[in-house]
Image (cartoon, rainbow, N blue to C red):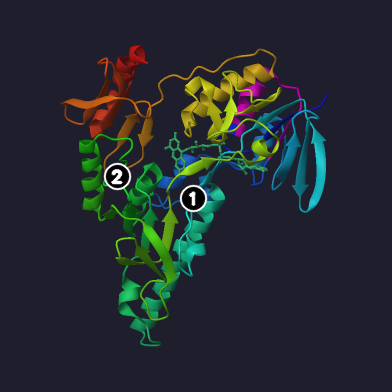
Amino acid sequence: MNPIIIIGAGLAGWTTAREFRKLDATTPVVMITADSGDFYAKPTLSNAFAQKKAPDQLVVTTAAKMAETQNVTLLAHTRVLRFDPYVKTVTIDKDGVVSSIDFSSLVLATGAQPIRIPLAGDAEQQVLSVNSLGDFGVFFQALESISIRRICCLRSYENNSIEGNENAASFPAKIVIMGAGLIGCEFANDLVNAGYQVSVIDPSSRPLGALLPEAASEQLRKSLQDLGVQWHFGTTVQAVNQAGESAESALQVTLANGQTISADVVLSAIGLRADTRLAAAAGLACERGIQVDAALQTSAPNVYALGDSAQYASAGNTTLPYVMPIMNAARALAQTLSGNKTEVAFPVMPVAVKTPALPLMIAPPKLGSKGQWMSAEPNVWQFNNEQNLVTGFVLAGAQTSKRAEMVKLLQPAL
Ligand SMILES: Cc1cc2nc3c(=O)[nH]c(=O)nc-3n(C[C@H](O)[C@H](O)[C@H](O)COP(=O)(O)OP(=O)(O)OC[C@H]3O[C@@H](n4cnc5c(N)ncnc54)[C@H](O)[C@@H]3O)c2cc1C
């Protein structure tokens, strides 16, 4: 019997394997991933610095242990080059050796890719993004090496041994974050808590502008500013250049408003785009993500998708790049893979924003909804649509404990 093949060992891939094994212990499953396959919770990447967690400490379960527990054959550090949904083969590249594997069903759990915008400057290539444990490792190393350089610099200065620069040695590393969305704000809070100097650049006029009512946004702006975050709204990063030998920091960031900021590291957090490359090359229907019907099937029979790569018909043809949708989708898909075709029904899934300066719980109204934000008590906002139904809410600070209460209010309106 040909195996079920799962491409991707992120939360979507592993959760599908785990849910499937609860229903079927024996059907062969092959999981193929370009990374190590170690299991980690991606949300921990944006609150690891303040907890002084190194990349290795974020691994929850090693790939080998996961493969053994879930009884899957794991092909790690293996890239899928293409698949044929009708001949039912996947072509892989492992260490330069190309081969093919046949499948009975295929699950695409290929995630998303960070959006990169073209920037000017001779250090544009040094701009980092964090969307995987591997990316986090690169970011972590960059900050570690700056800290080490500065400690050496300070010691040299104190010993008068070389031309140490007191200023460079005693100031924390400077990080410029492009984007004041969910991931940008979470990293800003985490890095400032960990003692770094943080500047955030965003073309809008406030943080989380697309998701929050103005008053909540203002509270978040102030809470993070009080911790030391420097905001630059209404402008964008235009160029990233080497700052030169004598400069305190390695990079110079030029903004569209003409201002320049010195930085040791630039982190781009301007959004993610579903990774549809394999699916589109195989001729599957893709828009903002790989299009799937209510049973998570793509436009090809026996080929399914979920996670950050999918665009769900059950959610009004949108992508849902969060943890909770993956849990729901994986449970439904496991049923279908084990022979019981099941449609996914997404409940209300508020997103917790990990900004300890001002914790937030957000259930946004549908994009483009007409209506208005109202607030009857402090730190509670609800979005009333034109029929006066509550179709979204935001809770801040201690009021985030009202999540269940607000979800109930929302249910009948959806
Ligand atoms: C910093 C950060 C913080 C977050 N915080 C939260 C949060 O607080 N709450 C929340 O709900 N969500 C959060 N999210 C979103 C959430 O983590 C994601 O929705 C989820 O982890 C996506 O899982 P995935 O399996 O779909 O994709 P991924 O984890 O990206 O996995 C994709 C997999 O596909 C593999 N792959 C892709 N192409 C190929 C190929 N051609 N060949 C082989 N393998 C391939 C990759 O190697 C990888 O294993 C956060 C995201 C980030 C980046």
Q: Which quadrant holds the N terminus?
A: top right
The reply to whether the C-beta atoms of the residues labelled 1 and 2 are less than 8 Å apart is no
Asked which quadrant contains residue 333, the reply is top right
The answer to whether residue 41 is magenta is no
Whether label 1 lies within 8 Å of ligand 1 gets the answer yes
Q: Where ligand 1 lies, by quadrant?
A: top right
Residue type at mark 2: give it: Pro
- The one nearer the camera, 32 or 161, is 32
The answer to whether residue 25 is magenta is yes
Residue range highlighted in magenta? 13-32
Pointer 1 residue? 130
Residue located at (38% from left, 31% from top): 351
Q: Residue furthest left?
A: 377
Q: Position of residue 175 (x, y in %)?
A: 37, 60
Pointer 2 residue? 207
Q: Position of residue 97 (x, y in %)?
A: 81, 50
**Does residue 173 appear anywhere in the picture?**
no
Q: Which element is circle 1 on?
A: loop
Direction from residue 5 to residue 192 in the image, left or right: left
Q: Which quadrant holds the C terminus?
A: top left
Direction from residue 155 to residue 14 in the image, left or right: right
Residue type at mark 1: give it: Val
Q: How many marks?
A: 2
Direction from residue 144 to residue 197 in the image, left or right: left
- The one nearer the camera, 325 or 55, is 325
**Does residue 281 appear anywhere in the picture?**
yes
Q: Which mark is residue 368?
A: none
| Disc 1 packing (10 Å; few <14; some 14–19; many ≥20) | many
Q: Position of residue 237 (x, y in %)?
A: 38, 59
| Disc 2 packing (10 Å; few <14; some 14–19; many ≥20) | many
Asked which quadrant contains residue 76, the reply is top right
